[in-house]
Amino acid sequence: MVLILDSSALFAMENLPEEGSLCPPGVIEELRRYKDGRLDLWGDLLRVSDCTKASEEKVKAAAKKSGDLGRFRPWI
């Protein structure tokens, strides 16, 4: 299983999961906007990847199911 981390997850975390997680580039941009110092600490541990259309559709479906669709922002 791979965890896709959004900015709120990264703001709340003190440590990254050892493996099995990644985030879209827009999340990194948001952390930089807020001058979050954890970016410097995490270095290469933070895996960044563009989202595929298929993965975006899965996230959108999950957001709809959880009632968060109004907050859904595509990352591509």
Image (spheres, rainbow, N blue to C red):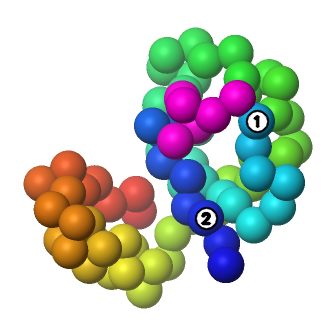
Q: Earlier in the sequence, mark 1 or mark 2?
A: 2
Q: 52 and 46: which one is in front? A: 46
Identify the disc placed on residue 3: 2
Q: Where residue 29 sits: x, y (%)?
A: 52, 34
- 18 vs 20, left or right, is right
- The answer to whether residue 69 shows anywhere in this view is no
Q: Residue at x 20, y 57 (%)?
A: 68
Residue 53 got which mark? none
10 magenta-colored: yes
Q: Amino acid at mark 2?
A: Leu
For disc 1, the marked residue is 15
User: What residue sits 87% from the left and 43% below the top?
Assistant: 44
Q: CA distance from mark 1 to mark 2?
A: 14 Å
The amino acid pointed to by label 1 is: Asn
| Residue interval drawn in magenta | 9-14
Q: Is residue 52 above or below residue 34?
A: below
Tell me, yes or no, if residue 56 can be seen here: yes
Instruction: Say which residue appears at 72% left-offset and 23% top-offset.
Output: 38
Q: Position of residue 60 (x, y in %)?
A: 28, 72
Relative placement, left or right, of 74 versus 38 is left
